[in-house]
Image (cartoon, rainbow, N blue to C red):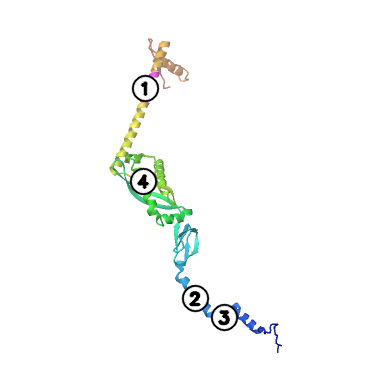
Amino acid sequence: MEPSVIDSDGTQPPRRSGVLSRLRRMHPSAFVRRHHFRITLFFLGVSFFLLLFWHTVIVAIPAGHEGVYWRRFFGGTSNRLLTEGSHLKFPWDEIYIYDVRLMTHKDTTYVLTTDGLTVTVDYVAQYRAEMSRLPELHRLVGEDYANKVVIPVVVSSLRQILGNYRAEEIYARDELSLLGEIRDRIRDRIETYPIHFEAVLLLRVDLPKAMAEGIVDKLLQEQRVLAYTYRLRAEEQESKRKETEAQGIAAFEKISGISMLKWRGLDVTSELAKSPNAKTIVIGTGPNGLPLILNSDK
């Protein structure tokens, strides 16, 4: 039996076995054994909560997309962007996902020209949301920004630009300059929002059938006139050439006193005389006599 120990103040210190017992009860393993049921119940509740609210607590953002976090009770739209991957949120908050890749919209519209004709235009618009300004885009426009901003601006700009021309001018206009004019008008209006406009392409421009046939016929007639004008200029040049040649012959005959016809005959006779074949050449009498070649087939 251990002797009793009395402190200086006359009190007896607690027994060591009681301290050790309390320490053993404070050990984690002992705590788990004592509260095993409560701990199991807690984890079951958390698991049930996660399974029940999985889609409202965990949000997956796919490749090429960015997320905007909206807090119901703490300031609304957050300026922090959520990148690709999975993200946690409170069930009462929302994460809005935006596609930040290049978007394409293909459609058909109708344009009334200055001469009162209706032109059918098939177009393609290419655009994308500004990634760094997605929270601003979400506050100003929202997820449906294409139908609210992009498409109305594109259609309006097509009608404004093409409506300034007659149908014939649209048909004959240089496509690159026309597209540049349309693109600049769209960008001036659409990029006041956090949206970048890439390009607009005209796939097809259909004029009324009678108008298209008339334009084609007119262009063919213009080509015929150009071809006829070219032939006239060629004939004029040929006439001038012959006139110059005749003037040269007249000057030659005047200076030499020999007609060009006789000169040609003498020249041919000289060339024939050099030939090794046997032949007979008869010179006609008189000043205008020309050589006559006999036996030329031998």
Mark 2 secondary-structure assignment: helix
What whole-number distance in Å separates the C-alpha atoms at marks 4 and 2?
A: 61 Å
| Between marks 1 and 4 in the image, the one whose residue lies nearer the viewer | 4
| Between marks 3 and 1 in the image, the one whose residue lies nearer the viewer | 3
Residue, disc 3: 33
Amino acid bearing label 3: Arg
In front: 29, or 151? 29
What whole-number distance in Å separates the C-alpha atoms at marks 2 and 3?
A: 17 Å
The question of residue 236 being in magenta is answered with: yes
Amino acid bearing label 2: Leu
Mark 3 crowdedness (10 Å alpha carbons): few <14, some 14-19, many ≥20: few
Which of the 4 image quarters holds residue 164?
Answer: top left
* Residue 269: x %, y % from top left: 43, 16
What whole-number distance in Å separates the C-alpha atoms at marks 1 and 2?
A: 109 Å
Which residue lies most toward the right here?
3
Earlier sequence position, callout 2 versus callout 3: 3
Which residue lies most toward the front here?
9
What whole-number distance in Å separates the C-alpha atoms at marks 1 and 4?
A: 54 Å
In the image, taking residue 220 as reference, residue 23 lies left or right, namely right
Mark 4 secondary-structure assignment: helix
Give the number of marks. Answer: 4
User: Which numbered disc covers residue 158?
Assistant: 4
Earlier sequence position, callout 4 versus callout 2: 2
Mark 1 secondary-structure assignment: helix
**Range of the magenta residues?**
234-244
In the image, taking residue 6 as reference, residue 87 lies left or right, namely left
